[in-house]
Image: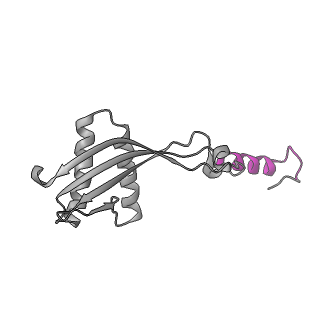
């Protein structure tokens, strides 16, 4: 990377600037400082015969996955309870369409705290914190 060139050499200066701006010499990668947690939405599907299945929001592409991830971030950060419930209900309805025999859907919205680097090195895993739960039943309509 031009480190053997003399310090005032313009090529060395240009390479050093590029490496600095691109973050190439930053060594922390995944464990950057202040990496925020993430959100998870799990649907508990209740069937008429009493059995329960669990489902996550399904996506058909990487781009759709990014959109759902961003939507979960928005849901997690909104302060307006009614809007949050409407958004979760919309996602629940999409799951319900795939499982029309389900009589009730219980939605669990969690915040996942990722461990810091030193915590990870000592074997600590992510922790899950339930923020909101919602019940949607067949009697309410879909």
The residue shown at (57%, 39%) is 34
Please tell me whether residue 94 belongs to the stretch shown in magenta.
no
Residue in the picture at 81% in, 50% down: 12
Q: Which residue occupies 28% across, 41% down? A: 84
| Residue 132: quadrant of the picture | top left
Q: Nearer the viewer, residue 46 or 70?
A: 46
**Residue 106 drawn at (x, y percent):** 26, 51
Q: Which of 46 and 78 lies nearest the eye of the viewer?
A: 46
Q: What colouring style does the render use?
A: one colour
41 or 22: nearer the viewer: 41
* Residue 16 on the magenta span: yes
Magenta span covers which residues? 5-22
Q: From the image, which quarter does the C terminus lie in?
A: bottom left
- Residue nearest the observer in this picture, 44 or 91: 44
- Determine which quarter of the picture holds residue 131: top left
* Residue 137 in picture, x, y percent from top left: 16, 52
Q: Is residue 121 above or below residue 95?
A: above
Q: Position of residue 127 (x, y in %)?
A: 50, 46
Left-right relation of 74 to 84 = right
Give left or right: position of 69 versus 90: right
Q: Position of residue 133 (x, y in %)?
A: 30, 44
């Amino acid at each position: 990377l031009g480190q053997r060139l003399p310090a005032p050499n313009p090529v060395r200066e240009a390479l050093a600037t590029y490496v600095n701006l691109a973050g190439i010499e930053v060594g922390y990668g995944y464990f950057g400082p202040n990496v925020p947690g993430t959100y998870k939405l799990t649907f508990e599907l209740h069937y008429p015969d009493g059995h329960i299945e669990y489902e996550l929001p399904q996506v058909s592409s990487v781009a759709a996955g990014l959109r759902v991830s961003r939507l979960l971030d928005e849901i997690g950060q909104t302060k307006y309870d009614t809007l949050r419930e409407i958004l979760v209900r919309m996602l629940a309805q999409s799951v319900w369409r795939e499982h029309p025999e389900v009589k009730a859907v219980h939605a669990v919205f969690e915040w996942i705290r990722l461990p810091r680097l030193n915590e990870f090195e000592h074997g600590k895993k992510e922790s899950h914190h339930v923020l909101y739960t919602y019940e949607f039943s067949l009697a309410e309509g879909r």
